[in-house]
Amino acid sequence: MNVTAPAGTDAATDALREAAAARPTLRTAFLRRSLRHSGLVIGSVTLLVIVAVALAAPLLAPHDPYAQDLAHRLIPPIWQANGTWDHVLGTDKLGRDYLTRLMYGARISLLIGALTVLISGTIGTSLGICAGYFGGRVDSVLSYIVTTRLALPVVLVALASAALVGSSLEGVIVVLGLLLWDRFAVVTRSSTQQIARTDYVAAARAIGCSTPRILVSEILPNILSALIVVATLEMAHAILLEAALSFLGLGVQPPLPSWGLMISEGKQYMFFSPWVIGVPAAALVCLVLAINLVGDGLRDVTAPENRG
Amino acid sequence: MPLLEVENLVVDLPVSSGTLHAVNGISFNLERGETLAIVGESGSGKSMTSLAVMNLLPKRANRRANRLVFDGIDLANAPNARMRTLRGSRLAMIFQEPMTSLNPSYTIGNQLTEALRCHRSVPIASARDRAVQLLEKVGIPGAARRLGQYPHQLSGGLRQRVMIAMALMCGPDLIIADEPTTALDVTIQAQILHLLADLKREFGMAMILISHDLGVVARVADKVAVMYAGQVVESGAARSLFGTPRHPYTRGLLNCIPVPGRTTPGAPLGAIPGQLPSLIGPQRGCAFRERCAFAAPECAGDIAFITAEPGHDVRCVRLGALGMAA
Amino acid sequence: MLSFTSQRLLVAFSVALTVSIVAFVLLHLSGDLATAIAGPEATVAQVAEIRHQFGLDRPITAQYFDWLWHALHFDFGNSFYYRDTVVSLVVSRLPVTLTLGAISLALSLVVAVPLGVLAAVYSDTIIDRLALGFCVLGQAVPTFCLGLVLIIVFAVQLRWLPVSGTASWKNYILPSIALGWYAVPAVMRLSRNGMLEVLSSDYIRTARAKGLQPSVVILKHALRNAIIPVVALAAVQFGFMLGGSIVIEAVFNMQGLGYLAWEAIARNDFPVVQAVVLILAVIYVALTFLADVANAFLDPRIRLA
């Protein structure tokens, strides 16, 4: 026993050293694959720019997003006749600077996307992990819950609940967070089922790890890449839904500069000044496209069949 | 004139790490009514060879040949439309996986009569008559009733019989059977094989039988070609090749099957150590040299066929040293 | 087939029942209905009066069973805003939404399935890339933005089609494009992936070995099998479209079920909201049930089991 112990330790340190050496190469391989994926690169760069602009909005924005100037209403953007450099993207019906409101609007969209995904991700992941790990009756109950959730018309229920909770930023986040967990549950469930069958989970069970510990420290880290992909796609979904709710007047309330609200407020002027809805709509499409490109790209890059 | 002439057939597949040389310049001839068996381990290129003749290779694959002539028709340069009129009517194929080779959404009758109606535009009724007749011929009881059934209602053995009947529908001149018995139970394997041999004789067809099972081949083949790593290493009349196998690989293969009366019961069967070499990248010399007990430096150079006896060719430079030269 | 159908029917019924509970509870727990109905200027006494008048002071289970019992008899009560029963309102608005949904679904299938098949047959070529790029772009455009753009281009500037309303069949063209757009990426991806999987299967090789024309191989042998999951998806998408038509009906001013619900939500007309949520959910459940049955019918392995 005494004789073999040092040898065993040696082997263990060797294995550790090997693992440590292998980790950076795995990471560089992942990076190299990511950089070769043009969609992922374009998406991440666009997304980073939008996030940076949103964070730095108070520093970058040329005006106050709420300052009204009725003398300078509906000034067209710079590329049209009568455009001025003072208001590069023009002004809205109350004379507020469009570029400034667009920058602050990015904060709302990103905030709603991130917080909604945090809530829905927590709900969906817990349900999915339990269903995937325990299987059997727990699993049938979950699939029944998911079926029921899918039967509810999301836009309508979100509108009605948001209206009753009181249309506000917080209300929209909570309602969307409580509604959009289905895809998290479905994806987590199937990934967990795969992981739960592996040897290292069996080993963890054999050495007497408690079930919560197996779920959190063995299974969760291994389904993380799948979760991140779902999170990006659901974030885009939440941002689109918020825009639709605000467009219908039952989401974020004025004077907050939500992009959906900007489109809704511009609707009455769109026949004569199409840019009033064109500018926020383009911003919305760019953001959602960037997030979707990142999500699709991550899925391609982390897909198991690409490994090796 | 032979029914099928193949000279220097090459099949390449581009893969992420280079070019995979699946078939590396093989040649053979087949006369009318003759059975050629192509033998080798999985991955030796035998299936690719048969798919190349049928022009059914995967989209990415490249096929080249000095000669690829079927009954005077140049298959190497035949346009797709011309090739299509030959496939299923004069060239037929039976695949390895009877469980998945039939379309689950259509009845047996529909799938049987389809080729005949496509190539010969016969009326439905006579196509069905022919289908019933052939199903009876391949030994399916209650043939008329089977026409209305779906593939999932049949067992694997029955499905392979259906596949055989399907291949015979247009009365082909050449039938290619790619491991037709591998996926079946041992008892059914023998039945299917005898059926194929009988049908071949009855319809006067030529047959290419692809197999990794030498026991199967020895019973039905007129000629045998042994493939290794995309090359034919030895070919000849079945009697001559099985009687005096000359290539070290063929001899290794034959040591792997127990022969009643010759193999001592309980004695270990021969196994060939090592595994197939990588087929990616340029290929030169004898592909078997890494696993060959008789390998010498000259095995890495170019190797020509040596005619050991008339019609029996061996691709080995060490025959003299092995005492196997004619 | 019979046991399969009856089993699915049972699941559909219980899901519909659960949905009715969820819809009811959701609307009753999201806020105080009595305060919402009474409006911001009402006194405490007025709110209490309304609470009692609408039976909102009774236990929620009693309210639910009362509502469910009436709902099962197609009685959803009276609208608070319109002097009319909820049922007659719904019946007068449903045709607009169903027509819109049906045309949208037809449009998206006509575009997405051939596009998916083409992308699969010509996989890894420029056609495949363009189709996938179209999908990614399509998913990023919100339906209401597309609706507004369509109005500006085709109704205002080109003057080809009417801006809003439901007067003639021309009114349905732009809204259907906007609504159908939403389903195109999902249907296209599923058709493409299904076709790719089927095209690499052994029975397609058998079909090609028979010397059949490429069109027969693709349409008869491959599409028939690849289309089975698309049928189920189409039913689900139809349900999503009916639910999502609220946005499009608002953009195009179409007096459909979605528009009714939108108005009702803004006016706290909650019997209408509850009825519309339940009806859309039941339609969705019925559609998924029909999709399951259609699936079983299309696949002989289930049909004859």
Image: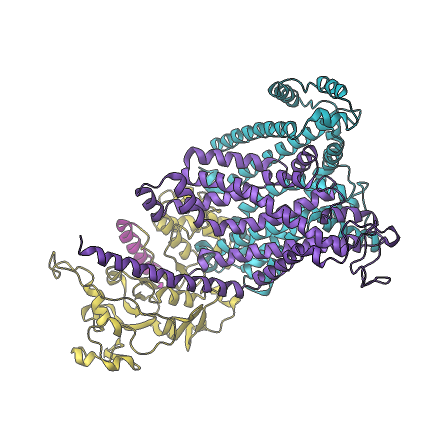
Chain colours: A purple, B yellow, C cyan
- What's drawn in magenta, residue-wise? B185-207
Horizontal placement of B252 versus C303: left or right?
A: left
Q: Position of residue A246 (x, y in %)?
A: 72, 43
Q: With C260 as the anchor, is C198 left or right in this view?
A: left
Depth check, front residue: C4 or B293: B293
Residue B2 shows in this picture: no
**Residue at point 77%, 44% (across, down):** C252
Q: Is residue B291 left or right of residue C137?
A: left
Front residue of A114/C170: it is: A114
Total numbered circles: 0
> Along the line of sight, which residue is nearer the eye, B69 or C25?
C25
- The stretch drawn in magenta includes residue B186: yes
x and y percentages locating residue C100 in the rendered image = 72, 41
The answer to whether residue C229 is magenta is no
The quadrant of the picture occupied by the C terminus of chain A is bottom left
Residue A246 drawn above or below residue C193: above
Magenta segment main secondary structure: helix
